[in-house]
Amino acid sequence: MDIIRELSSEKYTGRLTGTENILAVNYIVNNFKEIGLDYPQGLEDYKQFYTQKQ
């Protein structure tokens, strides 16, 4: 619940599809690192980039 409260706080505005929110991305990446989650080969730091059609 702490993670949900954090990510839904006003600090992380711009969470709509197609928007970029570096704060939220970094928060999630850091949490994945803290728990020791491995990421698939070929991804950079848990991130998979794609283009969202508008």
Image (tube, rainbow, N blue to C red):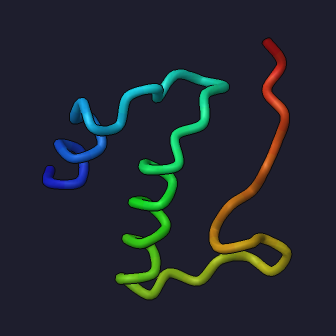
**2 relative to 42, above or below:** above
Examine the rendered structure and indicate whether residue 9 appears above or below residue 14. Answer: below
Label count reads 0
Please tell me which residue is depicted at 80% across the width and 80% down the height of the picture. Answer: 41
Q: From the viewer's perspective, tell me whether residue 54 is left or right of residue 7.
A: right
Residue at horizontal 36 percent and vertical 82 percent from the top = 35
* Residue 24 coordinates in the image, percent (x, y): 43, 48
33 vs 20, left or right, is left
User: In the current view of this chain or complex, which residue is farthest to the bottom?
Assistant: 36
Q: Tell me if residue 1 comes above or below residue 8 in the rendering.
A: below
For image coordinates 44% across by 87% down, the residue present is 36
Image coords of residue 52 (percent x, y):
79, 27
Q: Foreground residue, 9 or 35?
A: 9
Residue 54 in the image, given as x and y percentages of width and height:
79, 12
| Residue 25 x %, y % | 51, 53
In the drawing, does residue 10 fall left or right of residue 12? Answer: left
From this view, report whether residue 4 is shown above or below residue 52. Answer: below
Residue that appears at 42% across and 72% down = 30
Q: Quadrant of residue 42?
A: bottom right
